Amino acid sequence: MRKYFFFFLLSFLIDESVSAQSAEVLTIKKYGSENAGNIIKEFSEFLYLPNVAADPVGQQKNADFIMEMMTKRGIQKVQLLKANTIGVPPAVYGEVNVPGATKTLIFYAHYDGQPVNPAQWAKGLDPFQPKLFSDAIDKGGTNISFPTDGNYKSEWRIYARGSSDDKAGVSAILNAYDAVKQSGLTPNYNLKFFFEGQEEAGSPHLHEILEKYQSLLQSDLWIICDGPVHQSGKKQIVFGVRGDVNLELTVYASKRPLHSGHYGNWAPNPAMMLAKLLSSMKDDNGRVTIKGFYDDVTPLSLSERKALDEVPSVDRQMKRELGISAVEMQGVTLSEAINQPSLNINGMQSGNVGKMASNQIPTSATAVLDLRLVLGNDWKRQQQKVIDHIKAEGFYVTNSEPTDEERAKYAKIIKVTNGQDGTNAQRTSMDLPIIQKVIAAVKTTSQDQIVLQPTMGGTLPLFLFEKYLKAKTVTVPIANHDNNQHAENENIRIGNFFDGIVIMGSLMMIK
C-alpha cells in the first residue's frame, strides 16, 4: 500500500484530483507514466528535424517522420494529402475505423514552425537541438540530462523550436491513441488524423487540400490541438479563434537623407508623420478610432457571455509576470480584450538608433500593422477601413514607390502593401450536443475548473474548415502559457505535455 501511495504521490501524471477522474483517464495516465522514457525519446527525435515553414526539404522530412509515427501505431490509410500547387508542404493523414461506430472525430495539429534566429536564443541553446531544463530558464532552470530511467518531473521543460507550437500537439495526439489502443480501450467514434505543414505561413494553400479531399475529410467534429492553456494553469476549451490580416505602411519625404541641423524645422520628417498617423488610429483608452472598426462584430451569445464571465482573472498575474503596471484598455480584462477586434503595431523602422544613430532626417518610415478580427469582421473590409482612415488623414495612398510627379503634387504620401491574404475569425456554438460531450470529456481529466473561452487570442485557419467542409471545430490547447512560441527559447513544460496526452485520450473516448 505504501509503495502504491508513493507512486501516485510523486508521479506528475497523476495529481491529487484522481478521485474526480474516470477509470479510462487513469488508464491513459498510467500508460504515459510507464512509457514516459520512450515517449520523450521519440518526441526529441521529432524536435531535431528543422521545421521552418519556408524550408520544403525540412518540411518533407517532418512529414515522413510523422508517417512513420502513425504507421508503427497501426493507424490505417496513412498518406500525404497534397495541394494542387507544387512545392506546398503536404498534410499527413491517417484514420482508425472503429467497428460499429457511426460518427467521426478528426484530430488536427500542425508540424511546421516559425523562423529561428539562433543568436537570440539563450547561451548554449540550439533551436533544433532539444535540451532538458529543470525549470523555465527565466526562473533559474538549468540544463540537465534526459533521465535514463524514464522518470520526468512536471516542472522540467524541453527547449526547442516547435516543442510547444505545435509538435507537442502532434505527439500528444499520437501518443494518446497509443495509450487508448495499448490499454485495450475502444473508442466510440471513428478517428481521423490531419497534421498540417503550412499553418505558420498562414495556411495559404490549405483550402486546396480541403477542397481536393473533401469526401475523405468528412467528420462530426474537428478537434484542434494548438495553443496554450489558460494563464492560470487551468485546462481550457476554446470555441473560436480570431482572424488576422496585415498591412505595411511606408511614409515618404525627401528623396535623400538630410542633415537635421541644416533642414530641421523645414523638411518634413516621415517618422514623425507616421507616428502621428498611427496615434490617430487609437484613443488614450486603447479603443480603435477608425470609422466602423467595430460595426460588424457578431455579439457573444448568452452562453458565451456567461462562460466569459466565469473565466478566472489573470490580469494581476500577467502584469506582474510581464513587468507592466497598466493595460491598454482600462476596465477591460484580458479575456474580454481578445474577444474584440484589435489593431497592433508589429514593428516600426526609420533611420537608425543606438550606436548607428546619426543626426539626420530620414527619407521614409515604415510600420507593419496586425489586425486581429473577431466573428463578423471580414479581412478585406477591415483592411479597407484602415486605408479609408489613412486617406481621411490627408494622405495620398499608392501601392508602389512614389514617382517624381506624385512627390511634386502631394504633401503626404504613403505606400500601403496588403501582403498575403487574411484569415477570418471563426466560432462554434458551445451549446451543440457534441460540444457538450467534449466539455464533459475534458472535465473527467481534472477536478479543477475547466476554462471555457469563446475565442482564442491567436489565429488558426478554422474558417476554412467551415467554408470548404461545413465542419464544426473546437480547440483544446495543451501548452504552458509561458512557452515562448514564435520566439526564442520556445519550450514545453513536461507536465503540460503529458497532460495533453491524457486530454487527447479522453476526447478519443467521448461517449
Image (tube, rainbow, N blue to C red):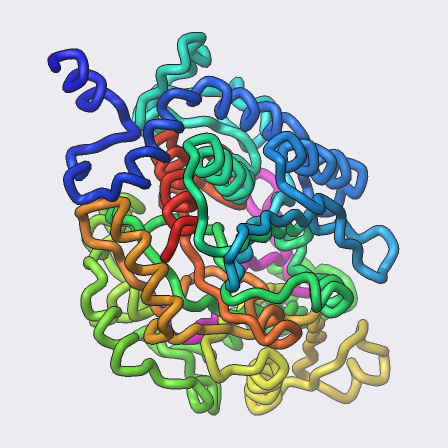
Q: Residue at x 32, y 54 (%)?
A: 441
Residue 85 vs 424, above or below: the answer is above
Give the camera-side residue of 95 and 149. Answer: 95
Does the magenta run of residues contain 360? Answer: yes
Using the rendered image of the protein, determine whether residue 441 is visible from the camera's viewpoint: yes
Drawn side of residue 110 relative to residue 447, left or right: right
- All told, the count of numbered labels is 0
Residue 153 vs 325, above or below: the answer is above
Can you tell which quarter of the image residue 210 is in?
bottom right
List x then y, in percent, for residue 47. 59, 29
Residue closest to the far right: 86
Q: Residue at x 68, y 53 (%)?
A: 198
Does the magenta run of residues contain 100? Answer: no
Can you tell which quarter of the image residue 240 is in?
bottom left
Residue 8 vs 427, above or below: the answer is above
Drawn side of residue 239 relative to residue 160, left or right: left
Residue closest to the far front: 100
Give the camera-side residue of 381 and 17. Answer: 17
Instruction: Give the quarter of the figure containing the N terminus.
Output: top left
List x then y, in percent, for residue 50. 68, 33
Residue 84 vs 94, above or below: the answer is below
Residue closest to the far left: 2
Drawn side of residue 151 relative to residue 41, left or right: left
List x then y, in percent, for residue 92. 69, 47
Instruction: Give the quarter of the figure containing the C terminus.
Output: bottom left
Give the camera-side residue of 222 and 101. Answer: 101
Residue closest to the far top: 148
List x then y, in percent, for residue 205. 74, 62
Using the rendered image of the protein, determine whether residue 279 is visible from the camera's viewpoint: no
Q: Residue at x 19, y 37 (%)?
A: 18
What residue range appears in magenta?
338-365
Q: Residue at x 68, y 77 (%)?
A: 414
